[in-house]
Image (tube, grey):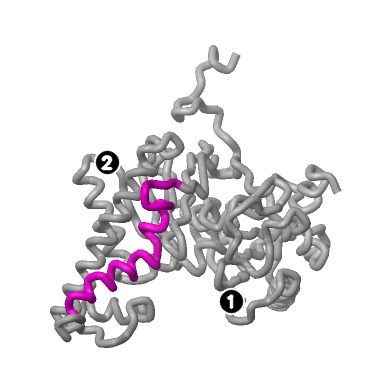
Amino acid sequence: MATDELVKTTTGIAAHGAARLPSVDIDSFNIEMKDEDGFLGDRASKGAFREILERWRKPLRKSGEDPFGKEPSDEISKKTLDAILIGDDTEAWAVVHSAIEDFAQELAYVTRRFLKSKAWAKTARIVVGGGFRDSRLGELAIARTGIILKAEDFKIDMVPIRAHPDEAGLIGALHLAPSWIFEAHDSILAVDIGGTNIRCGLVETGWKKAKDLSKAKVVKSELWRHADDEPTREGAVKRLTKMLKGLITEAEKDGYKLAPFIGIACPGVINEDGSIEKGAQNLPGNWESSKFNLPASLIEGIPVIGDHDTAILMHNDGVVQGLSEVPFMQDVDRWGVLTIGTGLGNARFTNRRKDNGNGKDRDSTENGKKKSKADKE
């Protein structure tokens, strides 16, 4: 099947990995910057924080005064570290705060490099998501990073993502869909694929309450920790199809008007035909093969939803997580997202001008001023 035919078959609306979406233009995503030590993202990942924590524990361990005892740094839970931040053990508190400070310096270094790149020029706000954000220590690191950058005269706001990181990648899928879908339907199916988990969700649009989708919420979800099962690629697709079919049944049973649309967040660079160019090495099997196309495989298993042909749109997971913030970024023109997890996901957006939030582009110039009559002619 030709590429253009495949795209039309699996989406019916737009190309996978599209640079232009209903609410935003995607200026860049999944940039892999390097310095003399390797990929920049490795300096501000979940693993990087654990390495920093370990460095602060080493001198204490030599003197037999490590407050964490023999527990490996990469096995100490975020919950435990958060408890230390409000506890009475001042030495443990000092170790964690020292690690937070060093990590914030690293994140500031990486963010500084993004902001100085052409693709991220004039960025006014950065939203930070990913699993690391889901902790008090993560929130402190984000806040400290923002302060460091402002002290260096970067005019940038740095804020934690609003939705829980487990749900942001599902809610963001709403912003892959064209606005006309929401007029006749009150929910969609969303998939968030990661190197460890695959999460599927039924997302209620809340469109009647808020046309900007700010009231959207995940009403049902199912998690599969595929890393534990180590399935084949075909086995993973079969399990994912089963999960989605289960959510379709539940949606019908609960009276939802489910749209014939599935939004997918997936690691890597997504080609317009739905294939994955690179960045999917942690997924089960070879997802970067030219012979594999996830949207096409899912269409085979779920050809229709309700009375309509199924449409699927897939994009990079960092992009989709960032899209959950679209309703709350309307006071700035350009903004970005960094997702701190196994690596550092990234995307930069420019808001598309709207008229009263009705989904139609306003006649405007690039800087947001209305065109004059002469300009239009």
Q: Quadrant of the C terminus?
A: top right
Residue at point 65%, 55% (across, down): 314
Is label 1 in a helix, a strand or a loop? Answer: helix
**Residue 154, labelled with which disc?**
2
Left or right, 110 with reference to 226 = left
Is residue 134 rendered to the left or right of residue 266?
left
Q: Which residue is mark 1?
A: 227
Secondary structure state at the residue bearing disc 2? loop
User: 123 or 267: which is nearer to us?
Assistant: 267
The x, y position of residue 263, in whole percent, is 65, 58
- The residue drawn where x is 65% and y is 50% is 277
In this rendering, is residue 259 above or below 225?
Answer: above
Residue 54 covered by magenta stretch: yes
* Amino acid type shown at disc 2: Phe
* Quadrant in which residue 311 is drawn: bottom right
Magenta stretch mostly in which secondary structure? Answer: helix
Taking the image as drawn, is residue 223 in sight?
no
Which amino acid type is shown beneath numbered disc 1?
Answer: Ala
Q: Which of the 4 quarters of the picture holds residue 90? A: bottom left
Q: Which mark is residue 118?
A: none
Left or right of 310? Residue 68 is left
Residue closer to the observer: 269 or 285: 285
Which residues are drawn in magenta?
33-60
Disc 1: CA contacts within 10 A as few (<14), some (14-19) or many (>=20): some
- Residue 167 visible to an observer of this rendering: yes
x 48%, y 43%: residue = 349
Residue depicted at x 76% and y 48%: 7
Does the magenta segment cover residue 304?
A: no
Which sits earlier in the primary sequence, circle 2 or circle 1?
A: 2
Whole-angstrom CA distance, mark 2 to mark 1, is 40 Å
